[in-house]
């Protein structure tokens, strides 16, 4: 009888897995020709730092955005594992084959969905579900995760692979920990160390694995004695400690650090924003306003909910163990992102990718525990979520549709307006882009956002120079941008205007200012070489070209530009000497 039951379960699981794979594929198979979005173009197609495999070592000693050539010094990111993975992807796919990156993202998302299926099945069995009956609710959990609209952002935003890696390896770590408690093998402990290290090193949210593991131990008591849990806990503590030490060393010069007082004054109100978005997802909105500070009514509601949850956990942990685990999972996994809102202007729905797994497991649990009528009512709910997700996927098909809709929803949100301007510029609708940047400039000035106002002036300066050939306006905009927020790109653009007019002395001054802000940068070295060549300082010009060459691999297409410029400088030097 048990053999027939096992065959029946295996057949049910195989059918469920086939359903998961085919459904996930159906949702994302038509996204492979999507254009690069957000930072994908700058950080994959046009980045210099990620082209060299040798730079992987820098991912463990430097700031996340500094390595991918877009460092602004404001956000304390340290994500060595996911960044190393991104650089390995570049070695395989290059900077133009974005479909390769999309396949990797899709596979990580699919694997997470399959792992949620198995994890849910185990959790439902642990609550005295019949083994054969856990397949359907586990399938509901996996499919619910697929149709949550906020999972779309993590799958289609190629540069930020950290969310996908954290969830995939966190669930895998929990499954491996479960097997370790059963067999206590050195090999399993080693696998647990590897997956835990990947989880924590992929993104700051990976640190949530420690409290989640403690939750698992507290509620399910997988060991008979305390000594059996020492090794898994020790492994997670060592991995987390190593990560935090590396992060401290890499970000020692970063001016921003977590402010506990500010975190406390915003945490409970922002957790309500996250909860609202998790339960009532918007199919289009890309960002939500956060609460900057202060104790408002949402803060008190959030605090009361957390206090009530603590009380319920203490009193009913045995009776409602799985329900409480799911709720605490959500709070634990969203907390790092909420604390990180100190360094961001808005709450991004992709922060809910990791907590979304708990929502998915909750859906499967509701399906199992509910009456037949409620189960049937879940079908239209899942269909509605699926439609919202399809709408969100469609919005992501290009930067223009993405930010046009976001600006339409939030016309006074500076980030939405600026990105809409950039997307309009990409379509070469320059007159409309200029009008848009002028509006951004005015709105940023009104809201005292110097950085975005500087960025708008920078783009106006570039367009005035390259499109409208108006150097007077261009210099005015670029100088204003520097006054507001000095950036190496602005100095480069200003230097280029002077170089094009033959004023290489002034060009060199601006390029040297750019170098102060961005040392060891490919574009800066090329620009310095250009100005020095104009000033007939050929030795220094060639030295800067060699510096530029040292930053890229021999297989990088930019090496041809370097070789061409070196030859041009050498030929020019010979022609001058012959005269």
Image (cartoon, helix red, strand yellow):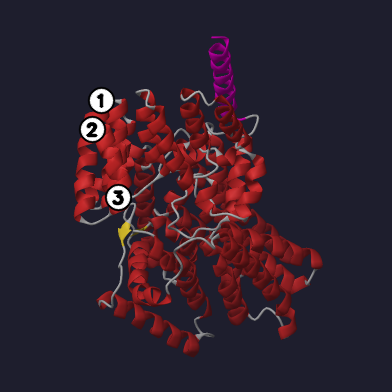
- What residue is shown with label 1? 468
Q: Which quarter of the rendered picture does the N terminus lie within? A: bottom right
Q: Which residue is mark 3?
A: 484
Q: Are discs 2 and 3 less than 8 Å apart at CB? A: no
In the image, what residue occupies the spot 37% across and 26% down?
Answer: 503
Distance from Cα at disc 3 to Cα at disc 1: 24 Å
Q: Is residue 457 magenta?
A: no
| Category of crowding for the residue at label 3, using alpha-carbon neighbours closer than 10 angstroms: few (below 14), some (14–19), many (at least 20) | some
| Mark 1 crowd level (few <14, some 14–19, many ≥20, 10 Å Cα) | some
SS at badge 1? loop
Question: From where the camera sits, is residue 284 visible?
Answer: no
Residue 443 horizontal side relative to residue 16, left or right: left
Identify the image quadrant of residue 374.
bottom left
Give the extent of the magenta segment: 556-579
Instruction: Identify which residue, 201 or 464, lies in the foreground.
Output: 464
The x, y position of residue 80, in whole percent, is 60, 54
């Amino acid at each position: 009888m048990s053999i027939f039951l096992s065959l029946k379960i295996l057949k049910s699981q195989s059918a469920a897995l086939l359903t998961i794979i085919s459904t996930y594929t159906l949702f994302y198979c038509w996204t492979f020709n999507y254009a690069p979005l957000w930072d994908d173009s700058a950080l994959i197609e046009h980045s210099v730092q990620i082209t060299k495999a040798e730079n992987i070592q820098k991912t463990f000693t430097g700031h996340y955005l500094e390595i991918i050539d877009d460092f602004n010094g404001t956000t304390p990111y340290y994500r060595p594992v996911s960044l190393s993975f991104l650089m390995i992807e570049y070695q395989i796919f290059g900077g133009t084959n974005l479909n390769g990156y999309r396949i990797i993202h899709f596979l990580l998302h699919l694997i997470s969905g399959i792992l949620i299926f198995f994890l849910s099945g185990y959790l439902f069995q642990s609550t005295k579900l019949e083994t054969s009956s856990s397949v359907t609710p586990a399938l509901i959990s996996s499919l619910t995760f697929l149709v949550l609209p906020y999972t779309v952002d993590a799958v289609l935003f190629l540069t930020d692979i950290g969310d996908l890696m954290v969830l995939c390896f966190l669930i895998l770590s929990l499954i491996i920990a479960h097997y370790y408690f059963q067999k206590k093998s050195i090999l399993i402990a080693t696998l647990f160390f590897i997956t835990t290290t990947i989880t924590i090193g992929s993104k700051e949210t990976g640190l949530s694995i420690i409290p989640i593991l403690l939750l698992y131990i507290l509620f399910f008591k997988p060991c008979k004695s305390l000594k059996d849990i020492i090794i898994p806990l020790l492994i997670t503590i060592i991995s987390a400690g190593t990560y935090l030490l590396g992060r401290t060393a890499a970000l020692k010069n970063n001016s921003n650090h977590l402010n506990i007082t500010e975190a406390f004054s915003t945490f409970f109100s922002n957790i309500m924003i996250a909860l609202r978005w998790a339960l009532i997802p918007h199919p289009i909105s890309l960002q939500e306003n956060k609460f900057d500070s202060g104790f408002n009514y949402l803060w008190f509601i959030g605090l009361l909910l957390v206090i009530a949850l603590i009380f319920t956990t203490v009193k009913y942990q045995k009776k409602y163990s799985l329900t409480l685990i799911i709720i605490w999972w959500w709070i634990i996994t969203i907390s790092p992102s909420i604390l990180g809102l100190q360094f961001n202007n808005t709450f991004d729905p992709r922060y809910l990718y990791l907590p979304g797994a708990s929502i998915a497991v909750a859906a499967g649990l509701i399906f199992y525990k509910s009456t037949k009528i409620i189960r049937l009512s879940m079908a239209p709910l899942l269909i509605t979520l699926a439609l919202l997700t399809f709408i969100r996927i469609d919005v992501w098909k290009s930067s223009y549709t993405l930010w046009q809709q976001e600006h339409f929803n939030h016309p006074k949100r500076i980030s939405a307006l600026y990105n809409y301007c950039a997307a309009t510029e990409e379509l070469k609708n320059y007159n409309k882009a200029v009008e848009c940047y002028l509006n951004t400039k005015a709105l940023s000035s009104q809201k005292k956002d110097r950085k975005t106002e500087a960025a708008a002036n920078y783009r106006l300066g570039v367009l005035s120079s390259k499109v409208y050939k108006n150097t007077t306006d261009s210099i005015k905009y670029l100088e204003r941008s520097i006054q507001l927020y000095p950036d190496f790109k602005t100095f480069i653009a200003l230097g280029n205007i002077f170089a094009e007019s033959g004023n290489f002395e002034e060009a060199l001054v601006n390029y040297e200012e750019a170098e102060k802000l961005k040392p060891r940068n490919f574009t800066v070295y090329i620009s310095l070489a250009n100005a020095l060549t104009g000033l007939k300082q050929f030795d220094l010009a060639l030295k800067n070209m060699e510096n530029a060459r040292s930053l890229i691999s021999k297989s990088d297409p930019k090496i041809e530009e370097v070789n061409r410029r070196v030859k041009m400088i050498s030929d020019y030097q010979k022609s001058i000497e012959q005269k």
